[in-house]
Amino acid sequence: MSQLESKSGNRLRGGIELSLRKVKLERLLYYLQRITGLSLVIYLFAHLVETSNRTNPLKWSETVSFLDRTPFHLGLMLLVMALAFHGLNGIRLILLENGFLLPRPTQPVYPYRKAISSGIPRILTIFFLLLFSLVALLIIKEFYGVISCQRT
Amino acid sequence: MSEDLIIQITGISLLILLGIHLFTFSSYSGGLEENLSWEKVKSRANEGWNLFYFLLLSAVMIHSYEGVKRVLSEYFPGKPISRLLIPIWVSVYLWALIPIMG
């Protein structure tokens, strides 16, 4: 997660900037990165419990048949999307955090421009969103196949 | 090694490892239902996938620990978050290692 965004996040927290109308794209991505990360941690613990049954064939088949239901598949689809979002946005943040694709620092002249939400970093954000949309479509296609083939 | 570097290295490793993990269960390699059958699960355990799952589990536990610690320490600055999280994460990690090693 980006320290740049994180620091400004602390400054903004609780302020009027958090009204939905004024939330910037990068700020929204920052919150989504946290929400998806924490959701994935919760799922990780559930997934570890679920897969711990793989040592016993009877328990394993019971677990698999229990989870072979549409709501679980839909939930898993959302989690895989969250994973894709977290991973792709993570690459964007790693690039920015290490200073790649950021413009040269300049003197702060009013009206101030945020380097992170203009120029190449903004293009990177748009590219990330397009890539994520493509991956999300692939995930939907994959799970549509799973749900339509599932046992009733 | 700094916390930022740890989270970045494990994050990139996870992109590769989770990509392989998801591909294993995708329609491109037989589909979810077939790959979740007991025979397939058992055969994967005998085909050397245990090392892969060990690496995946280790990376995911380190990355999640660092991530949760970072979020909590922003909301509760100055509190000894690691002291609370380390026992939970280590216990879960060791417990999850049993089926992989077993």
Image (cartoon, coloured by chain):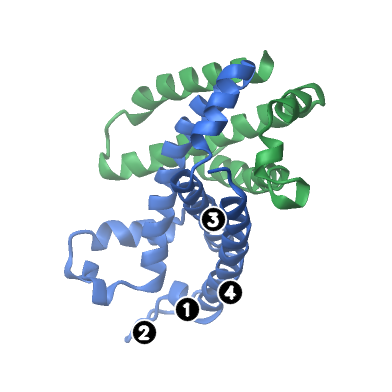
Chain colours: A blue, B green
Describe the element under mark 2 as helix, strand or loop.
loop
Instruction: Kindly report the distance in space between the C-alpha atoms of the residues bearing marks 4 and 3.
Output: 13 Å
Residue A64: quarter of image: top right
**N-terminal of the two: label 3 or label 2?**
3
Instruction: Kindly report the distance in space between the C-alpha atoms of the residues bearing marks 1 and 3.
Output: 26 Å
Q: Could you tell me the amino acid type at mark 1?
A: Thr
**N-terminal of the two: label 2 or label 4?**
2
Give the number of the mark in front: 2 or 4: 4
**N-terminal of the two: label 1 or label 3?**
3
Describe the element under mark 3 as helix, strand or loop.
helix
- Chain containing the residue with disc 3: A
Q: Position of residue B94 (x, y in %)?
A: 54, 17
Q: Which residue is mark 2?
A: A109
Instruction: Kindly report the distance in space between the C-alpha atoms of the residues bearing marks 2 and 4.
Output: 29 Å
Q: Nearer the viewer, residue A105 or B17?
A: B17
Q: Are marks 3 and 2 on the same chain?
A: yes
Q: Could you tell me the amino acid type at mark 3?
A: Gly
Q: Which residue is mark 1?
A: A106
Residue A30: quarter of image: bottom left
Q: Which residue is mark 4?
A: A127
Describe the element under mark 4 as helix, strand or loop.
helix
Q: Are marks 4 and 3 on the same chain?
A: yes
Q: Which residue is mark 3?
A: A90
Instruction: Kindly report the distance in space between the C-alpha atoms of the residues bearing marks 2 and 1.
Output: 8 Å
Crowd around label 4: few <14 · some 14–19 · many ≥20 (10 Å): few
